[in-house]
Image (cartoon, grey):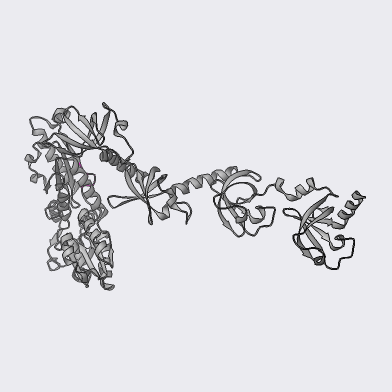
Amino acid sequence: MEIIKAKTAGFCFGVDRAVKLTYDLLAQGRKVATLGPLIHNPQCVADLESRGAVTAASVEDIPAGYEAVIRSHGVPAAVDAQLRSRCAAVHDATCPFVAKIHRLAARAEKEGKLLLVAGDPTHPEVEGIVGHTGGEVFVFQNLDELRSFSTPENCQKPAFVVAQTTFQVTKWLECTEFLKKVYTNAEIFDTICNATLARQEEAEELSRRCDLMVVIGGRHSSNTQKLVSVARQYTKAVAVESPEDFDPALLQGVQRVGVTAGASTPSSVIEEVLNRMSDVIREEELSFEEMINNDSMKPVRAGDIVKGVVTSILPNEIQVDIDGKQTGIVKFDDFTDDTSVQLNEAVKVGDELELYVLNVRDQEGIANLSRKKLEENKGRQEVREAAENGTVLEGYVTEVNKGGLVVKVKGVRVFVPASQTTLRRNEDYTALDKQKVQLVIKEYNPPRRIVGSIREVLAAEADAKRAAFWDTVEEGKTYTGVVKSLTSYGAFVDIGGVDGLVHISELSWNRIKHPSEVVNVGDTVEVYVKSLDRENKKVSLGYKKQEDNPWEKLKNEYPIGTVFTAPVVSLTKFGAFVRILPGVDGLVHISEISNERVEKVQDVLKVGDEVQVKLLDVDFDKKRISLSMKAAQQDEAEVEE
């Protein structure tokens, strides 16, 4: 027989804190009284009483001169005030998660809001919560009670919604879905303790795999009863308060036992129950160890991992043989999400597949199996470990919405908020739809949500690129980059994790009013490093090339004395400017326009005229060019003559 103990079994943080506090006070020789049993475990309470602690049913029952310990459930505000006026000292061991709900209850009264509490109205924790508000309050134990209360008038009221820290998660999810649809002014606070959630999740997972679930804990423990309720949805489950309560007959015909414990169960009690179970097993004539080793005696159970050999392939399902004992069926939807897959191409008869058992139809001798569920379970484990270790995972974007992205990672649904999708703000994250991405898991909290970040991976890559860039960069080095943004004074280009600035004057040899006349965001450009500021991590880039310099073309293509035709581009009092090359204009002085006297340039020329000129002189330093229409006319006359 296999006995599986839950990792989350035993004291939660709040209970552990209260118990240690009380034992410490007793060890110091203090007179201690607890208001009610400190925890829902008679063995622990009896041990405290043997050391001198008094368990008082009410404030009046606490002996004079005793110090009071408020247990992790907390107490109403009025009871707290009574304790402080009566006792020598008060030690508040209220669980921090419960204390948070007390503050919310007080806020509800202060802000005039209805307080809705999901929980057992007779439980001390819920009584304490209700006792911290003087406003309207309603406690509901399930969705039906909430529905009955939710009249049109109540649904319109502004409300705070909280839950008992040990409230059953599945019931809470049902209720919150209803609240979101019906209540227009409700603020929902998820106050179920993380430890409670983890304990219930593990109990559910174990109960799917086991023939029997043993829940160790006090009979009056809400936490223990919730665990039994969760487990009974999937298998036989019993509550055990002490080793003496365990009935050996429960193990008859059982192959796998799951063991968990409520938040108020000491580890010593858990070990005693486990030892009792082991003694029962050893007393059996046929050892359970032999049964485990005898494969023929092991039935296939829901939650098992089995190996099956493919015997038949149909368009919508695969049939497998499980160890020659049972037939298994894998439906298409349990094999893959990819509708383009052809089963007869994905597998062949004789292939061995590892599969997850969904359920077993005993009368028909058929097991329904799933490859998807197996991969999802393995994926969840990998995703959980990645969340703990900060490992980078790869996923596929399956959905884009206003809030961000949904990414499938090893079969697990991971939500990436919009703020964590891209490296730069305002980047279009919708472009990632149906793309492979790398991400890290920032929050692992199933079944509510698993949250990832693509941005963190991109930022780490960018940091590495920047470090490599500054290690190798030097002035004059050429890079191929991508234009990331434009401003009125230039363009920023990503050249490998670092954005460098190409000033507007470096974009073109011609005068331009805006960088968009030369480049656009997203363009791939070749740039070179003009200068570096290593201290401030700034890079100035050049884009225009020397070979494109129109003054160099002028020097090479227009020697002094060249006669050519060019357009007039502007007029002044002292002459006309003629465009020789783009970016290069020359001046025809008023005295060089004609052999006849010219009073006004406008009388002879206008912008756009094509005129024949002669290159008289060029001052390359001052970028000045002298031209003459008169000299060109004389040259032409001489040629004709």
Q: Position of residue 301 (x, y in %)?
A: 17, 37
Quarter occupied by the N terminus: top left
Asked if residue 191 shows in the view, the reply is: yes
Give me the residue at 12% from left, 35% from top.
364
Q: Position of residue 353 (x, y in %)?
A: 27, 31
Q: Nearer the viewer, residue 255 or 451?
A: 451
Furthest-right residue in view?
641
Name the chief secondary structure element in magenta: loop
Q: Quadrant of residue 176?
A: bottom left
Question: Left of 308 or right of it: where is 496?
Answer: right
Q: Is residue 558 magenta?
A: no
Question: Left of 468 or right of it: where is 553?
Answer: right
Give me the residue at 89% from left, 52% from top.
635
Q: Nearer the viewer, residue 293 or 246?
A: 293
Give me the residue at 80% from left, 48% from top.
558
Query: How many circles with numbers are drawn on the protein?
Result: 0
Q: Position of residue 165 (x, y in %)?
A: 22, 58
Q: Nearer the viewer, residue 565 or 483?
A: 565
Magenta-highlighted residues: 5-9
Q: Quadrant of residue 71?
A: bottom left
Q: Nearer the viewer, residue 283 or 428?
A: 428
Asked if residue 28 shows in the view, the reply is: no
Question: Left of 428 or right of it: where is 376?
Answer: left
Question: Left of 483 or right of it: where is 68?
Answer: left
Q: Position of residue 494 (x, y in %)?
A: 56, 49
